[in-house]
Amino acid sequence: MPRTKSRPDTLRVAPIVRNFFEIVHASDRSYQVIADDAGVSRETIVRWQTSASPSLTTFIAAVNAMGYDVFLQPVTQADSGANNIGS
């Protein structure tokens, strides 16, 4: 039986990964459905919550499976500290 989704605000991960889990948490899609659509294992997505940073390829695949995309934007002075892992 799959575990319930962890609350994104409790995760100590990079902000972009936390944002992904916020989107997942707000959706009605299970990790298994997202994983199947992205071509990765469910366990891979679960691991991103605690012990492993996603590879760029698998992360983009999972983000795309949720109907989103990853892109770069200039950092503003107010955002300069927002890229720290675990912030």
Image (tube, rainbow, N blue to C red):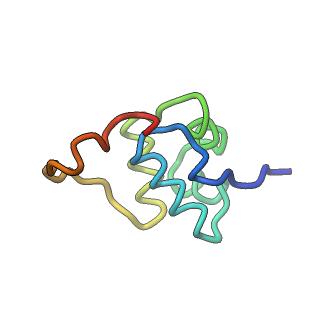
The image quadrant that residue 68 belongs to is bottom left
Identify the residue at the far top of this view. Answer: 51
> x%, y% of residue 65?
47, 60
x then y, percent, for residue 51: 59, 28
Answer above or below: position of 36 versus 49.
below
Residue drawn at (54%, 37%) of the image: 12
x, y (%) of residue 22?
53, 59
Please report the residue visible at 67 percent of the width from the left and 54 percent of the height from the top. Answer: 32
* Residue at screen point 43% across, 55% down: 63
In front of the other: 76 or 3? 76
Left or right relative to 51: residue 14: left
Between 20 and 62, the one lying in front of the other is 20
Considering the image in quadrants, where does the C terminus appear? Answer: top left
Q: Is residue 5 left or right of residue 26?
A: right
Query: How many numbered tags mark residues here?
Result: 0
Task: Name the residue located 56 percent from the left edge and 61 percent from the top edge.
Answer: 24
> Looking at the image, is 66 positioned above or below residue 35?
below
In the depicted structure, whether residue 86 falls above or below residue 65: above
- Quadrant of residue 43 within the rendered picture: top right
Along the line of sight, which residue is nearer the eye, 42 or 28?
28
**Residue that protrudes farthest toward the right in the picture:** 1
